Image: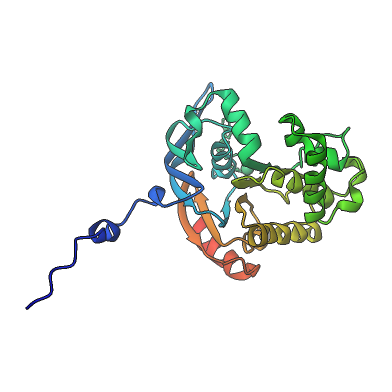
Amino acid sequence: MSEPDPPPVAAPVASTPEPAVAAPSVVAVRDLRKTYETPSHQVVALDGVTLSIPAGRFMAIMGASGSGKSTLLHVVGGLTPPTSGTLLVEGNDLARMSDRARTVFRRRRLGIIFQDFNLLPTLSAEENVALPMIMDRKPAEETRRRAREMLSLVHLEHRADHRPDALSGGEQQRVAIARALLNDPAIILADEPTGNLDSRQSLEIWRLMRRVCQEQGKTILMVTHEAHGAAFADEVVVLRDGRIVGTLAPGGSGDASPVAAGYQELAT
Ligand SMILES: Nc1ncnc2c1ncn2[C@@H]1O[C@H](COP(=O)(O)OP(=O)(O)OP(=O)(O)O)[C@@H](O)[C@H]1O
Ligand SMILES: [Mg+2]
């Protein structure tokens, strides 16, 4: 007697290649376009970008000046609306949210880091870190404890009382990273976080980002023009004229040479 056929489980579905945006991911972007209108002409900054960032992945974006890196980061962060395409962050369509809901989502679920640190000059390091919880009117004791915890994560507990002007550039960026981590965000978005730092401080920041990914399991999207920084990411996406032209996979090695060589080939 022959065996009965196995039940037709989900095999046909499972073997069908899914579009990238259907995979479980923190960020899912499909066919994203962004056009800026200026009085004299149109600038196509993003020209059909599709990518997905799984939880826990450290992804870097590289590309020549004007290739659309910051625009992509700003769209993912809900700071700039896309012209068309879909964008989901933790399954939320930021473009459909009210301005108020988007602002709250950004504060609670996104950690954003900029080149110029964006710290408030009159507040101490600890107060700067605590800001997102203060704005959410969280209890003072819990806020202080959490802010201290984050400062110690970036090894700056001994600088808690310092104002930004009494911190080095690298220390200021570490405060900004501590602030970005405060609310245990879904993703950290960083636009050239080492753009204002020397090479020693830059290396410190890249290592910290790698550690945050590895030890805290954080998902990171970082724009950089430095192969050395991108080499600390798991994956590097290369943009040219608003399109993804390829990806590299340094696997967080920190080894810049293969990234520099691969980038050279893709970007030119
Ligand atoms: N607000 C704006 N209005 C009009 N054009 C813009 C605006 N912002 C960016 N652009 C244009 O869109 C394109 C992409 O800009 P974007 O800032 O994303 O580039 P980038 O890759 O981050 O460059 P860089 O490495 O110099 O920071 C550029 O041609 C830029 O001039
Ligand atoms: Mg930029």
Q: Residue drawn at (46%, 39%), measured in percent from left and top?
A: 87
The image's colour scheme reads rainbow
From this viewpoint, which residue is outermost toward the left?
Answer: 1
**Could you tell me residue 143's position as x and y percent?**
79, 39
From this viewpoint, which residue is outermost toward the front?
Answer: 1
Taking the image in four quarters, ligand 1 sits in the one at: top right
Using the image, determine if residue 239 lies above or below residue 251: above
Q: Is residue 216 left or right of residue 16?
A: right
Q: Is residue 34 left or right of residue 229?
A: left
From this viewpoint, which residue is outermost toward the bottom?
Answer: 1
Task: Locate residue 77: give its quadrant.
Answer: top right
Whether residue 60 can be seen here: yes
Q: Residue drawn at (52%, 23%), measured in percent from left and top?
A: 40
**Could you tell me residue 245's position as x and y percent?**
45, 54
Judge by depth and name the residue closer to the eye, 180 or 193.
180
Q: Is residue 251 left or right of residue 163?
A: left
Whether residue 268 can be seen here: no
**Could you tell me residue 262's position as x and y percent?**
53, 65
**Could you tell me residue 192's position as x and y percent?**
68, 48
Using the image, determine if residue 22 lies above or below residue 138: below
Q: Is residue 27 left or right of residue 232?
A: left
Q: In which quadrant of the rendered image does the N terminus lie?
A: bottom left
Task: Locate residue 140: give its quadrant.
Answer: top right
Task: Locate residue 154: give its quadrant.
Answer: bottom right
Report how many numbered discs are placed on residues in the image.
0
